[in-house]
Each structure stands twice: as structure tokens, then as C-alpha cells.
Amino acid sequence: MIVVTGATGNVGRPLTQALAKAGEQVTAVSRHAAAMPDGVRHVPADLAEPQDLAPALDGAKALFLLLSGDLHAPEARPTDIIDLAAASGVRRVVLLSSQGVATRPFGPSRIAMRAVEVALSEPGLDWAVLRPGGFASNALAWAESVRTQGTVASPFGDVGVPVVDPADIAEVAAACLLDDRHTGGVFELTGPEVITPRQQSQAIAAALGSPVRFHELTREEAKATMTRFVPPELADETLDIISAPNPAELRISPDVERVLGRAPRPFHNWVARSIAAFR
């Protein structure tokens, strides 16, 4: 049995579907109840409280660990989840980490995530680490303004990074959970091209078949919006990257193709599959 945390999100949902389709027994973990594929067990849990995960781990052989905001919650103890998994008999953990662990190692969130990566090697587990850059699905933050105003509002409109399709992350995660060849691997996951926010808005407009106006926010305006959802220090770290990505953050990684045997999906592919959100 494989446990998938963050099972209702942009990565966890397609990963859960892929594992179920492959005939694996899957336990999906999320904070709240949600519809799941046939045969998938759902367990509600808050990863900021590691013991909440214990019922899901009973009988599990592998764990996909997506910490997201739980990494930054007050009193969070993410390394306790790894200890709990090992004590429960889990033999393999695939961790969704961040490209910034390598490219910006001294930010508070990167230091915390690095500690989780290091903890993976301590209980004698099989492991793999996925380090994606920016997600194509971050564009969903524009969905309401596109629907209601025909507008995308973003800072640094002409500064791009190679955003990765969450479906590619999910497929790489499935491969790492199921295939011993990927054990011990650290995989940097990017899309196939550097694309700016302005170009992303043009891709959305093309898929809609109607104009989308681009409005450039100041850094201060963008931070005010972001801090409604994430801690201020994490907002600043993100804005530092998207305002001035360094050469490592602009690099097109070969790792998606190395694992999956095909090139990563471009942004317009994600838009085509997600266009209903913008209509």
C-alpha cells in the first residue's frame, strides 16, 4: 500500500490516480474529505501534527511526502513524520522538496526543507527527492481575474523561469515510488522552456480565443497578495526568485526526460488541460 499526502492538490491528485490505475493499493491523505478514485482509501490528517498520519501509515510500504504549508506551521515537526513512517514499517519515501534547497540554500524555508531531506537518510529508508522549480499551476491564481476581468496581474512580467507541469511531477513521483532504479536519486524538475508571466497570459488568451490584458504589479502589491496565503518570509523568498532568477534557476533540467523517457510538457499543454478554470 502506498500513502499519498497532499492527495487533493495539483500533484497529489494525479499521482493518486496514476497509482490506482497501476493497480496499487493507495491511501490518500488530506485535511478534508474529498472524492477519490474507486478503491482509494481516504484518511484525513493534518501533517502539522505528525501523529495524525499514524492510521494512514498502518500497513504502508511507501509514502509520498508533500509538506507544503505544514512545513511552516507553528510547532511543525516534519522530521517526526519520517521517524513515524520508519517505525510504521514504511520502506520507501519520496519527498517533494524544492529547487531552492540547492539554488537558494540559506532561505528559512530552504533550511527547513534541507533538514527534512537529510532526515530521510537516517532511518535506513529507500528514498528519492524531487526538487521542482515554479509550478505551471501557479497560474490558477489568475483564474478569477481572467474570468471576471479578462486580466492577469503579476509582478516582473518579462522575467521568466522554466515552470514545470504538476502532472510531470506526479509521473516522476510514481516512477520513484514504484521503480527501484530511482532509489537515492535527487531530481530537479523543470519545464522545457523559460516562460515569462506575460507569455503565460498570452498562452491563456490563445487557449480561450479571447484577449487577456496583462497588468504588472509592483513587488509590494504582489507581496500583499501573497501574504494572505503564505508567511511573509516565504513570500519574500519567492519574489526574490521570480524577480531575478539565478543561472541555476534558469537551467532546463534533463531529469523529467531522464526518468520518464520523454520531454517535459510545455506550459501551453497545461493551459489546454486546465482552460475550464479560466472560462
Image (spheres, helix red, strand yellow):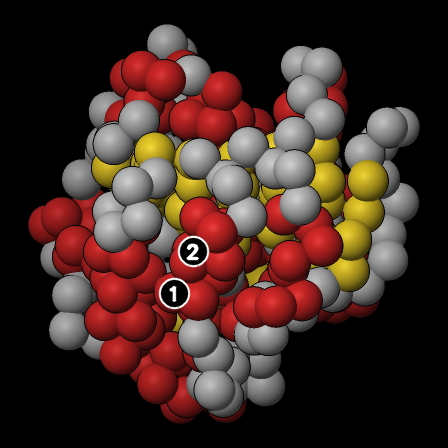
| Residue 50 on image: x %, y % | 56, 68
Would residue 86 be seen by someone viewing this image from the given angle? yes
Lateral position of residue 79 relative to residue 20, left or right: left
Give the image location of residue 233, x and y in percent: 35, 85
Crowding at mark 2 (Cα within 10 Å: few <14, some 14-19, many 20+): many
Reading the image, the residue beneath label 2 is 82
Q: Is residue 278 left or right of residue 107?
A: right
Quarter of the view holding residue 19: top right
Residue type at numbered disc 1: Thr
Determine the secondary structure under disc 2: helix
Q: Determine the image quadrant of residue 189.
A: top left
Quadrant into which the N terminus falls: top right
228 left or right of 255? right
Q: Amino acid at mark 2?
A: Ile
Q: Which residue is mark 1?
A: 79
Determine the residue positioned at 82% across, 40% down: 41
In this view, the residue in front, 221 or 38, is: 38
The percent position of residue 120, horizontal first and vertical second, equals 31, 50
**Dot 2 and dot 1 residues touching (CB under 8 Å):** yes
Q: Is residue 28 above or below residue 151?
A: above
Find residue 162 and report its horizontal and vertical position in percent.
32, 42
Please say if 23 is above or below 213: above
In the figure, 278 relative to 152: above or below?
A: above
